[in-house]
Amino acid sequence: MPSPVCPDRALKVCPRPADIHYGMAQPATDSRLQTLLARTGGRADFPAAAEIIQQLHATVQRENCAALDVVRLILKDPGLSSKILRVVNSAYYRQQSESISTVTKAVIILGFETIRDVATGLLLLEELIKRGHTSEFIREGLRRSLYCGLLAQALSAKVGYPTPEEAYLLGLFADWGMLWIAAHFPKDFEKAVVMTRQRGIGIEDAVGEVLGVPPSALAAGILDKWHFPPSFAEFFREPRARERPETTSPEGKLLVLVGLAADFTAPSGEHSTEVGATVLKRFQTYFGLGPEPFLEAARTARDAFKEQAPLFGLGPAADDDDEPRLTSRRAPVATRSPIDLRAALEVVSEITSAILQQGDINNTLSMVLEGVARAGGFPVVFFALRNPARDHLVGRLGYGEDVKPYLHELDLPLRAGAGILADTVLTEKVHVVPDGSPAPQLRSVTSFVSHPLIVRGKAVGVLVCGRTEAPAVAQEDVQLVQLFCQQAGLALDRSAN
């Protein structure tokens, strides 16, 4: 049997040396672990990603979770939506001929859990790429992590594990403790590397001595802190669970299949062919299957890796250079062109299809908000509609800082002098506020456009699109906002029939 090789030729798989005891949690005090977690979690540039991850998992677990709730959280991170769309339009996820242009549609088609886990993987990989962009160890480790996650995901379909995205995420985490230490504690990591050379011990043991906490314990602590399923932390705390023959329970299958994927994609050594054979033998023993299902999953993972590695910033440059890469620093709104006409046309096409299919009106309006936010560079967007008595404006849907509580409390009388939003509806005229002085009680908004929402010749509400920094909203933004207002009007009109 040929040696199993990672899609990148430099990443040949092999067993971890027996004296490393990878994943074996050495005794470590809770206080030391908490100190290390606090040292990373207290940094100013980290909590934003962690907060979004925690909020995504908490939101998806709610019984009343809606697509809008998930999309709203994703749009908190500038650029995350475009990265998600590139991944879900890859061959692995794209099961239909037409492309997906909005996160809203991706959520509807692929499900809350899939988008949650894709977003989580992107955020986590981005965090370590950002910190370790100059480290070859981290870069190669992240490539193995992605390959391991994709292999675990593909294996889940072969062995009947019901939630392949969980297998994908845990596969991403397989080397997380070590990569986390290398990224967040580079000086301590270098001390451990020197120790391995001087004393001939494994890197996991050396890191455990230097930091007082083994990588496996740190990985388990991070997963606990971020409220991932308990089985994720068990993968690191109970490494024997990965090799137990009892795989009838979903949790047992998860731990075993990810353990196999982790061993198959481990760093290269002298006996990769033997390791491949050993992994295949264990797979057959644990699941009662022949080698072919595993090899098919490996081929699927290899093909997915080749396509997705560039999208994650872990491989050769993608052909499409106009999309931001994960390795690039986040660009402030002020330094980029605020209007993206290509994105606008793609989203409008998707909205039109949703209108013709008479899909859920809230999902369609969510597509409108997402489209105008991304195409126009508006961090704050929302709808306010007439109440049933038609004498007040009330909040409906929206994205952006402070928007949700603002819409919850919004109850504006429709009379002269009640403010710009009321005037927009009463006069059916667009209002552009470039300096933010009469902004609609949103502290973050510095400029905005208020556009009437017309249905059957009458204003039924208003679409507000605001910016929180330069460039200020100007008259040239109105045409784009008008385009999406027309789409929203058509959707409301169609839903009323």
Image (spheres, rainbow, N blue to C red):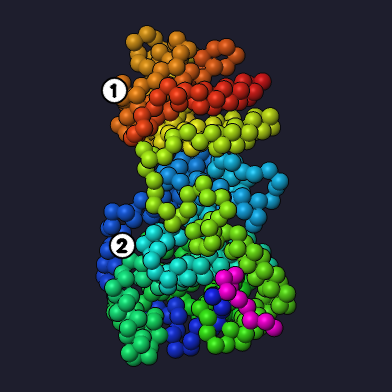
Q: Residue furthest bottom?
A: 199
Q: CA distance from mark 1 to mark 2?
A: 39 Å
Q: Main secondary structure of the magenta part?
A: loop
Which residue does the image show at 26% across and 70% down from the upper left? 31
Q: Which residues are magenta?
A: 1-9
Please say whether residue 20 is visible from this viewpoint. yes
User: Where does residue 433 sit, x and y in percent of width and height?
Assistant: 36, 21
Q: Which residue does the numbered mark 1 point to in the structure image?
A: 437
Residue type, numbered disc 2: Thr
Quadrant occupied by the C terminus? top right
Residue type, numbered disc 1: Ser
Task: Please give left or right for residue 261 compared with residue 184 in the image.
Answer: right
Q: Secondary structure at mark 2?
A: helix
For residue 403, the mark is none
N-term mark: 1 or 2: 2
User: Where does residue 257 sit, x and y in percent of width and height?
Assistant: 59, 72
Q: How many marks?
A: 2
Q: Which residue does the numbered mark 2 point to in the structure image?
A: 40
Which residue does the image show at 58% across and 26% down from the upper left? 487
Quadrant occupied by the N terminus? bottom right
Q: Quadrant of residue 305?
A: bottom right
Assess whether residue 402 is covered by the magenta stretch.
no
